[in-house]
Amino acid sequence: MFDAILTASASAPSGPMAAFLNFAPLILIFVVFYFLLIRPQQKRMKEHREMVAALSKGDEVVTSGGILGKVTKVDDAEAQVEIATGVKVRVLKSTISEVRSRTQPKAANDTKADKKADSKTVSE
């Protein structure tokens, strides 16, 4: 009986290969966690940072507390959100969880065309 145990232990790899085989499951678990948890979370954080950076006046947003409102002013770290007519609150930009509708910035060419169209309607 002891001979079988000694024979089995004698055939086990030794040295650097044994150390690698002992750590292989841990390395595999880390790789799986990276691709299933860490990497997607980093991607979501990057998308959120980009969304907050692109926040502009007129956007309809949802805060992390569930408050719906329209952005009336944007500063470096804060945004002023109108949640009802005449009711404005200051929120941290990082607490905005979703932009429901985004205002489209006008191009330089569009503003000139709009001014010409406005002047035509006024003069008529």
Image (tube, rainbow, N blue to C red):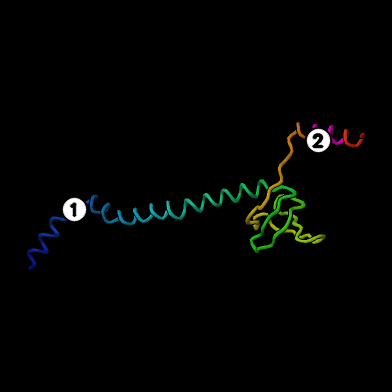
**Start-end of magenta stretch:** 112-118
The residue under the point 75% across, 48% down is 57
Q: Which residue is mark 1?
A: 13
At a point 63% along the width and 55% down the height, the residue shown is 98
Using a 10 Å C-alpha cutoff, classify the residue at mark 1 as few (fewer than 14 neighbours), some (14 to 19) or many (20 or more): few
Q: Which quadrant would residue 12 be assigned to in this image?
A: bottom left
Quarter of the picture containing the N terminus is: bottom left
| Residue 35 in the image, given as x and y percentages of width and height | 42, 51
Residue 69 falls left or right of residue 39: right
Q: Marks 1/2: CA distance?
A: 79 Å
Left or right of residue 86: residue 19: left
Of residues 80 and 119, which is closer to you in this image? Answer: 119
Q: Secondary structure at mark 2?
A: helix
**Residue at 78 percent of width and 59 percent of height:** 88
Residue 85: x %, y % from top left: 81, 60
Kind of residue at disc 1:
Pro
Rendered residue at 81%/35% (across/down): 114
Q: Which residue is mark 2?
A: 114
- Between 67 and 73, the one lying in front of the other is 67
Q: Nearer the viewer, residue 32 or 69?
A: 69
- Marks 1 and 2: which is nearer the front? 2
Amino acid on which the number 2 mark rests in the picture? Asp
Q: Answer whether residue 65 is magenta in the image.
A: no
